[in-house]
Image: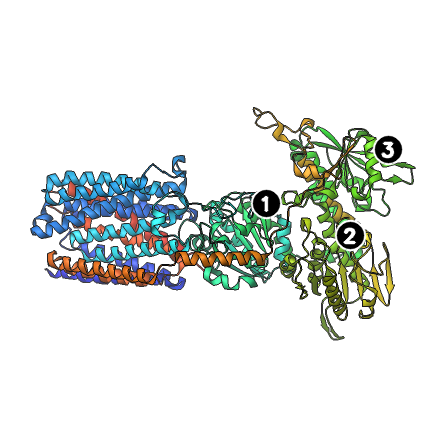
């Protein structure tokens, strides 16, 4: 061996060390870029040293340049232009090129007459074994990777499904047997005859690679790509053995180990085996005892139970964020699909600026590659030190105030933990349901890959925000930005100059704010083009109820109604008490202001009101007398208490939709005016309490002394109670709350309140989510709790009401002896008898020095806000009653017309609300049918634990079976070693030693790679697998260059160069994105 050749071998040893360190460097984000640099140096020196050695001569340099330059250009272009959302496809292509380069090198080696002539007969036999394996594995890797990439892209459409031919497993086994069968004559034939068999093996390998991967589902492609990455490494090992190059063997072993470990990690994360994944098809769906298989609205979790998503909206998510201090974001493939990572990063930045603690929880199989989510977040400049693994976030989940699940499904499925009959039982998942509140961002009501129901989405503390992830987050960011901007003091203080709001009284400020809103919403010429032809007339008159300030149609909702195809008629001055002047309405095209109420009643097809029609003291007639037959009246009705009104509606022949009868189901949430008014009422209750309390809510330490924060007790944690808790907490008070329904505990705590409990086993959850009447023993314990709380409470707000019954009395007269003078009690149930024994309906009184407020018009005391919320509920209702499904099928985009104004009683919402239809009284038969309550959590938990015990006993392997397997493995390993020692040529043993040690080193260092860098690991190992270029370089300098060997070797160099340049550059591109705070 010449000195130059010795130098090449020595440099190859150094290059192998560099390659090992390039992977070891990925153990942390800090050292990752340095590791990638060492990999590039190792690759460069090994190629340069071989190029200047005796292996490359004369025309070989020209061929090397012609092959490498296009490969460098193509690989660099791919790396520099690929989007991070396309990284799975990029890695898949690099896998394909790695396998193809190895296969081409093996082909060229087989056809090299010069190289084959120097081997003994035994060596040629061993050589052919490795060549056959290298070609078969390389071809399977190439075509399998191409199919995997097409599946990830979903193009063409035929690739979106799963190829499940009858007996597909037998087909795969037959193809493997064919490869083995044709390998035998290849081994014993001469060069020409053997080449024919080798071509047949190649064709069969193509079929196996295509069919094998095409039968595997798209969600399993991450495992498939990792395994194909491993196969490209093993193909390189075979090429290394065939040309006797230890550097190829070393790098191939590193790459093979990497892909195998990543595949194992992902299979373990899905609680599935390699065999289960590679058998293909879909995950088998098990039926549990309830017969459940699928997911979707209306499908039960238990027998006789209907499950529905509880939908939320952006403004509610904003409030949840403002009330949370610790926030966890769990991204999934939906984030990548919607390209929402930058919106997520913007949200993260705002929250961190607002001093919120934000972390990310990443599941090992989230996305389409291991570490895919980490790369996407890094691209969007999310600091890597707040992006944590599943095992890091699960222990602290119970301390988390809010979890936002963005496009994830199976990775947060609680049935993996709670249901041993589930197809994913035992799969490690991010246990988001243990947090105080969960909001799931979903595109629709579809299922995860497993196709099973996700109980997490239906839990009491979970809400679902439907829509494209990017659009939903951008809307959320737009809502949060001005809030955080204002709170951080970024807004200028020009408002406090001359003519500022500080010079105005309260009414002037409110009116100015409304006029400002009008300027922002004023109808433009562009808006006019969007207004469709009107098909029905909506009317709104001034409320005649005593002291009422609300109006059913605001300028904002009027615009929405007009754009929906309604013509709007208003009584002049109807919005005055809500700070909506006629001037604000006059600028709206499609809206007519009439002088008196009688004209509006006459014109309108639909009348929108807040209060039910009542007798007008000024005119001496009832409002129903102004109605005409067939007219639809929408308002609060309270039919159970207004039988006389229902009779008048019957006589007038009108239709009545009662806003108080909206059923409590998720899809009617946007119509739920009771909740809207309760929310405003709870907020106003705190404001009224603060007005009469006349002391600080927030604790203060000043030069004039130290003042403790106010202590507030909220009794009843429904919508009104939660609103009161949030408002009082934001004002700085110490807030405690009590409710007979244990399920609201998490909601109270998520708002910063302390949930009070009594040691008494009784659940107060009743029909429709309302509280039910409790036992005498429970009430006695409850009274003791309230009496004790009075000793240290400054403000009590009661919200407890039971539909159709007098309000329960909770604050009794004797308790006032424990209340301090100056304390305040706000009784929100004063309209139905009151929760406080001394409450006087509609009044604020003093009792033993304590102010007791019994106002029944709390929502009306915020007329502007209440009108806007109620008007929005009405607009949603007016959209609900338009049933375009009745249009003929041949009409693609039907226009809204009066014929589609449909009070469809098959629609459970309309059926429940319509108490009178064309004069026919439907109440009480139309009342919503309530579903029975769910079983108690303790009962469910007990059943699950019993199932788990049986499940473990049935599936746990015996100790003797484990021992037998281990003995069999070692017998097989020893037997293989003896056979190799007896029959392998002497030249083979050193290469085997290198392979063994390289595999052990690779297996060891790859386990140390941080999961966040698993995607860069795959790309850098693809680049390293390009070292197979050395095999091609050894074959391009034969004297007769115009041979198949030279052409195939040049092709191998070209393909390997794509891998080298593309792999290292895209790895560097990804690693540069990972930044710490």
Most foreground residue, 27 or 206: 206
Label 1 or label 2, whichever lies nearer to me, is 1
Rendered location of residue 937, percent (x, y): 58, 57
Q: Name the N-terminal-most of marks 3 and 1.
A: 1
Q: Which residue is mark 1?
A: 304
Task: Tell me the residue that label 3 is attached to.
Answer: 625
Q: Is residue 337 above or below residue 384?
A: above
> Which type of secondary structure does the marked residue at label 3 adopt?
helix
Residue 760 location, x and y as percent? 67, 64
Instruction: Answer few, some or many: residues within 10 Å of disc 3's Cα (few below 14, many 20 plus, some between 14 and 19).
Output: some
Distance CA(mark 3)–CA(mark 2)? 39 Å
The answer to which of 246 and 1053 lies nearer the viewer is 246
Q: Which residue is mark 2?
A: 509
- For the N terminus, the image quarter is bottom left
Q: Closer to the camera, 155 or 410?
A: 410
Is residue 126 visible in the rendered image? The answer is yes
């Amino acid at each position: 061996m010449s000195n130059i050749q010795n130098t090449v071998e020595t440099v190859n040893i150094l290059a192998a060390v560099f390659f090992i360190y390039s992977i070891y460097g990925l153990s942390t984000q800090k050292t990752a870029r340095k590791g990638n640099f060492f990999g590039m140096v190792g690759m460069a020196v090994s190629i340069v040293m071989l190029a200047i050695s005796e292996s490359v001569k004369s025309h070989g340099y020209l061929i090397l340049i012609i092959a490498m330059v296009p490969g460098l250009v193509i690989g660099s272009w791919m790396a520099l232009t690929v989007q991070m959302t396309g990284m799975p496809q990029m890695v898949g292509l690099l896998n394909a090129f790695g396998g193809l380069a190895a296969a081409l090198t093996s082909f060229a080696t087989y056809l090299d007459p010069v190289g084959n002539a120097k081997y003994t007969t035994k060596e040629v036999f061993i050589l052919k074994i490795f060549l056959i394996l290298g070609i078969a594995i390389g071809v399977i890797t190439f075509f399998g990777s191409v199919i995997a990439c097409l599946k990830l892209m979903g193009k063409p459409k035929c690739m979106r499904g799963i190829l499940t031919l009858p007996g597909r497993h037998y087909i795969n086994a037959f193809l493997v047997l064919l490869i083995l069968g044709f390998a035998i004559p290849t081994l014993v034939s001469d060069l020409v005859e053997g080449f024919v068999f080798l071509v047949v093996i190649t064709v069969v390998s193509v079929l196996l690679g295509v069919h094998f991967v095409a039968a595997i589902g798209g969600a399993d492609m991450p495992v498939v790509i990792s395994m194909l990455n491993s196969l490209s490494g093993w193909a390189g090992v075979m090429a290394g053995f065939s040309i006797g190059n230890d550097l190829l063997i070393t790098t191939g072993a590193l790459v093979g180990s990497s892909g195998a470990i990543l595949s194992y990690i992902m299979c373990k994360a899905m609680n599935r085996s390699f065999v289960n994944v590679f058998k293909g098809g879909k995950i088998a769906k098990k039926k549990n005892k309830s017969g459940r298989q699928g997911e979707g609205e209306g499908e039960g979790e238990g027998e006789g139970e209907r499950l529905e998503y509880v939908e939320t909206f952006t403004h509610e998510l904003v409030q949840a964020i403002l009330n949370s201090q610790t926030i966890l974001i769990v991204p999934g493939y939906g984030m990548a699909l919607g390209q929402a990572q930058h919106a997520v990063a913007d949200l993260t930045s705002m929250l961190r600026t607002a001093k919120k603690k934000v972390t990310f929880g990443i599941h090992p199989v989230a996305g389409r590659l291991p570490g895919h989510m980490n790369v996407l977040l890094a691209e969007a400049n999310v600091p890597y030190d707040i992006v944590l693994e599943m095992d890091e976030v699960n222990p602290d989940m119970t301390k988390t105030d809010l979890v936002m699940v963005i496009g994830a499904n199976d990775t947060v499925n609680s049935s993996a933990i709670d249901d041993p009959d589930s197809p994913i039982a035992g799969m490690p998942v991010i246990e988001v349901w243990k947090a105080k509140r969960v909001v799931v961002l979903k595109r629709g009501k579809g299922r995860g890959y497993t196709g099973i129901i996700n109980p997490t989405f239906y839990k009491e503390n979970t809400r679902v925000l439907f829509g494209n992830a990017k659009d939903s987050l951008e809307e959320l960011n737009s809502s949060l930005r001005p809030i955080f901007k204002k709170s951080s003091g970024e807004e200028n203080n020009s408002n406090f100059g001359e003519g500022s709001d500080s010079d105005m009284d309260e009414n002037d400020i409110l009116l100015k704010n409304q006029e400002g809103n009008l300027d922002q919403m004023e109808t433009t010429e562009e808006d006019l083009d969007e207004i469709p032809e009107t098909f029905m007339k909506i009317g709104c008159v001034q409320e005649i109820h005593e002291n009422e300030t609300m109006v059913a149609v605001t300028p904002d909702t009027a615009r929405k109604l007009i754009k929906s195809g309604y013509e709007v008629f208003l009584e002049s001055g109807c919005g005055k008490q809500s700070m909506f002047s006629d001037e604000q309405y006059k600028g709206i095209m499609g809206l007519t202001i009439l002088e008196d109420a009688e004209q509006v009643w006459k014109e309108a097809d639909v009348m929108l009101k807040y209060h039910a029609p009542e007798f007008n003291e000024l005119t001496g007639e009832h409002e129903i007398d102004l109605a005409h037959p067939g007219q639809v009246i929408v308002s609060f009705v309270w039919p159970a208490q207004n039988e006389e009104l229902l009779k008048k509606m019957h006589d007038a022949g009108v239709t009545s939709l009662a806003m108080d009868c909206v059923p409590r189901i998720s899809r009617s949430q946007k119509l739920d005016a009771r909740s809207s008014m309760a929310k405003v009422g709870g907020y106003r209750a705190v404001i009224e309490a603060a007005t009469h309390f006349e002391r600080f809510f927030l604790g203060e330490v000043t030069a004039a002394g130290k003042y403790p924060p106010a202590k507030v007790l909220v009794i009843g944690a429904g919508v009104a109670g939660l609103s009161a808790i949030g408002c009082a907490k934001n004002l700085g008070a110490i807030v405690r709350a009590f409710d007979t329904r244990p399920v609201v505990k998490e909601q109270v705590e998520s708002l910063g309140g302390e949930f009070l409990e009594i040691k008494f086993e009784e659940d107060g959850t009743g029909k429709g989510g309302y509280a039910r009447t409790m036992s005498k023993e429970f009430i006695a314990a409850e009274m003791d709790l309230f009496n004790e709380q009075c000793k240290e409470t400054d403000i009590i707000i009661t919200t407890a009401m039971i539909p159709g019954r007098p309000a329960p009395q909770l604050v009794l007269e004797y308790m006032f002896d424990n209340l301090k003078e100056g304390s305040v009690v706000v009784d929100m149930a004063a309209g139905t008898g009151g929760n406080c024994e001394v409450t006087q309906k509609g009044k604020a009184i003093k009792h033993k020095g304590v102010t007791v407020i019994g106002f029944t018009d709390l929502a009306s005391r915020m007329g502007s806000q209440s009108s806007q919320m109620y008007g929005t509920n009405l607009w949603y209702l007016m959209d609900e009653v338009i049933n375009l499904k009745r249009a003929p099928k041949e009409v693609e985009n039907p226009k809204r017309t009066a014929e589609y104004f449909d009070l469809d009683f098959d629609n459970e919402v309309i059926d429940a609300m319509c108490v009178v239809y064309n004069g026919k009284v439907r109440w009480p038969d139309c009342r919503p049918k309530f579903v029975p309550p769910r079983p108690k959590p303790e009962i469910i938990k007990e059943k699950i634990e019993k199932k788990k015990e049986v499940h473990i006993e049935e599936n746990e392997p015996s100790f003797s079976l484990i021992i037998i397997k281990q003995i069999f493995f070692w017998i097989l390993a020893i037997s293989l070693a003896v056979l190799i020692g007896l029959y392998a040529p002497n030249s083979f043993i050193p290469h085997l030693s290198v392979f063994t040690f390289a595999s052990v080193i690779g297996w060891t260092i790859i386990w140390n790679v941080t999961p966040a860098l698993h995607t860069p690991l795959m790309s850098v190992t693809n680049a390293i697998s390009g070292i197979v270029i050395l095999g091609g370089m050894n074959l391009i300098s034969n004297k007769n260059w115009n041979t198949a060997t030279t052409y195939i070797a040049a092709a191998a160099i070209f393909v390997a160069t794509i891998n080298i340049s593309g792999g290292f550059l895209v790895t560097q591109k990804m690693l540069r994105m990972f930044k710490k705070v």
